[in-house]
Amino acid sequence: MRKNSASAAKELGLFWPMQTTDGAAIDVFVYASTLQSFDPAPVGPVGLLKKHRLTLERIASDKYDRYGAAANNLLHITDDDLRAAKANEGTAYVTE
């Protein structure tokens, strides 16, 4: 039997736990493609996560303080979040 439709590409999500200042435990995640569009360095998604971990944690903390987490205790860092952080801090986020 032959499949007529192409399967949709799956997006790789990178997750890590974070404890908030009020003691809540949440899971923060960012899509690999979001990190790769932010920094095209050829180190792979996990390498980019390690390289920008402090930046991502700052963004997650700020975003949690403003909006909280989703009902399932997930906090999604988006491309817009990374661009805003980069614009607000100049090149500090790129060189970590």
Image (cartoon, rainbow, N blue to C red):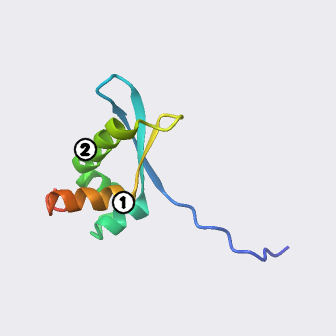
The residue depicted at 16 percent of the width and 57 percent of the height is 89
The residue depicted at 40 percent of the width and 56 percent of the height is 78
Disc 1 crowd rating (10 Å Cα; few below 14, some 14-19, many 20+) is: few
The residue indicated by pointer 1 is 80
Circle 1 or circle 2, nearest the eye: 1
Q: Quadrant of residue 84?
A: bottom left
Give the image location of residue 36, x and y in percent.
Answer: 35, 66
Helix, strand or loop at disc 2? helix
Q: Amino acid at mark 2?
A: Arg
Give the image location of residue 43, x and y in percent.
Answer: 29, 64
Q: Residue furthest top?
A: 23
State whether residue 85 appears in this view.
yes
Give the image location of residue 63, x and y in percent.
Answer: 34, 43
From the viewer's perspective, is residue 29 above or below residue 84? above
From the viewer's perspective, is residue 12 above or below residue 59? below
Q: Nearer the viewer, residue 65 or 53?
A: 65
Which numbered marker is on residue 30? none
Give the image location of residue 73, x and y in percent.
Answer: 48, 34
| Sequence-first disc among 1 and 2 | 2
Q: Nearer the viewer, residue 13 or 84?
A: 84
Disc 2 crowd rating (10 Å Cα; few below 14, some 14-19, many 20+) is: few
From the viewer's perspective, is residue 3 above or below residue 55? below
Q: Is residue 50 left or right of residue 91?
A: right
For the N terminus, the image quarter is: bottom right
State whether residue 93 appears in this view.
no
Q: Nearer the viewer, residue 20 or 46?
A: 20
The residue indicated by pointer 2 is 58
Q: Amino acid at mark 1?
A: Asp
Helix, strand or loop at disc 1? helix
For the C terminus, the image quarter is: bottom left
The residue depicted at 34 percent of the width and 39 percent of the height is 66
